[in-house]
Image: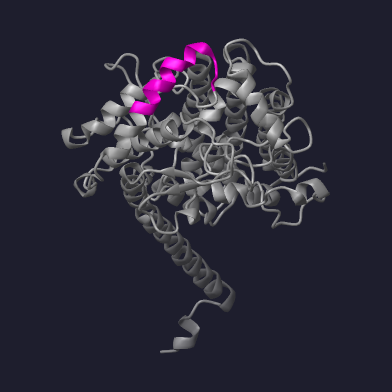
Amino acid sequence: MDVVNLLPSPPHFFRLFFRLALSLFTSTLHAKHRRAIAERPLLMDFDIDSATGFFPTRPLPRLPDMFGVWEHALAEANVNLCLGEDDREEAIPKRLLGDTWRSRIRAWPVLDTEVLESDHRLLQRAHMVLAWLVNFYVHSQEPSGDSASIVVPRSLAVPLVAVSSRLGIAPVLTFADVVLWNCVPIDASMPLSMDNIQFENLFSGTEDERNFYLASARAELRGVEMLRIIDDYSNLPAFTDWNTISRVSRDLNRLAGIIGDINEIIQSVRPMCDPHVFYFDVRPWFEGSGAMGPHAPKWAYEGIENSDKLDLSGPSAGQSSVMHALDLFLDIDHALREKRVPAPSESNRRADLGFMERMRRYMPGRHRQYLDFLAATPNPVRQLAQRFPTLREPYDNAVLALKRLRDEHMKIACLYIVTMSRSTSARGGCPVSAMMSKLEARGASGSKSARGTGGNELSALLKAGRDATRRALLKKN
């Protein structure tokens, strides 16, 4: 038998071979993708819920009875203590209460938190309670007038550092303590939502403070849909067929709309929160160690070695995990690592380029792990938009929406912090004389830059963030 003549002609043979090889290759890709999806961590692995995002799904449970002294002290401090620099007549009784309250805390024993380590929510509750107690303790003291360290007693410092280590979060009041863990539903029978939210703890007891937290919480809740869009993108197939590209285009346009909604929520703070009340009555409670500059008094955590090395700046909107997730998804280069146009200005270069990365140390550890996961995505959406022209406009629409949000945030920061720091007259009801003396001592009337709640030089930082967002645009700036 002539075997050679029985073989297909070479062209036909190679076509069959190529089809078989392509089929095997495609099947391998599909199998690898299915394995990758199966091995990919879920949102719940990062303590993120598909309905509430970075908020706990239910209010944090109260601490066991053995820690009741902490819970009772926080309930007593709420609204009943005054800023140490408040020299109004009505503040005198609160100052006396504060003296007694702080002396009791100094006399407390150091409670062992090991029993809490098996329950993640109890650890979060302990962090929130202790962090609020620390800020109440520090800021209800009368200013000493020197640069000596402010001592946080070991009864607060030691357990706070212990639970912070377990949670992977800074041992100080953070955005999570003030917003994410501080809220409970008004109607406990209904889930947390924009219209079903209230706050357990307030420093000043003012409606302005409550409304400030409310705007932040509503922005976070609106951002939950962004997290779902980002998660859906991460689950898309590795290959780029037309259906996939169309879906990405639709989701980018949805994302632009959500960012616009968050922008409106942030702007809604203006009629609800008076700038004078915020700056003079609320904001001072947020200040962390050395928050007003390198020469401001630092906090010393009694019983903790090298406590000066701890992250103790205090809460800031820059600690919002949902905004960091958005920046990572859109590939906003805050650290100026990429060569993009227009080139950064001198002001951009002088800004704190490590601010965003440093703020992640103030987030819960699992949320920070989620951001690390996003940063390592193998198919960044900006690169995909560069490859496929049909995605460029939807991508740019999302970036422009984020730039507009940052433009408005700059205006609000100017009104609430920069303008107020240069004010020479304050609204009645604020601790005017002591605060103004403090401002004059800092040179805040214009000789020094106003600082954000996390201790950053605010104007340069916000401009740098806005300009970094603009440089992500694919069309010519």
The image shows residue 130, relative to residue 420, as above or below, that is: below
Position of residue 25 measured from the top left corner of the image (x, y, whole percent): 47, 66
Position of residue 179 measured from the top left corner of the image (x, y, whole percent): 44, 29
The image shows residue 5, relative to residue 363, as above or below, that is: below
* Residue 267 can be seen, yes or no: no
What's drawn in magenta, residue-wise? 86-100
Determine if the magenta segment contains residue 89: yes
The one nearer the camera, 308 or 315, is: 308
The one nearer the camera, 90 or 133, is: 90
* Residue 212 shown left or right of residue 28 in the figure: right
* Image quadrant occupied by the N terminus: bottom left
The one nearer the camera, 96 or 181, is: 96
How has the structure been colored for display? one colour
Name the residue rendered at 40%, 57% in the picture: 36
Q: Hey, which quadrant is residue 59 in on the image?
A: top left
Position of residue 62 measured from the top left corner of the image (x, y, whole percent): 24, 30
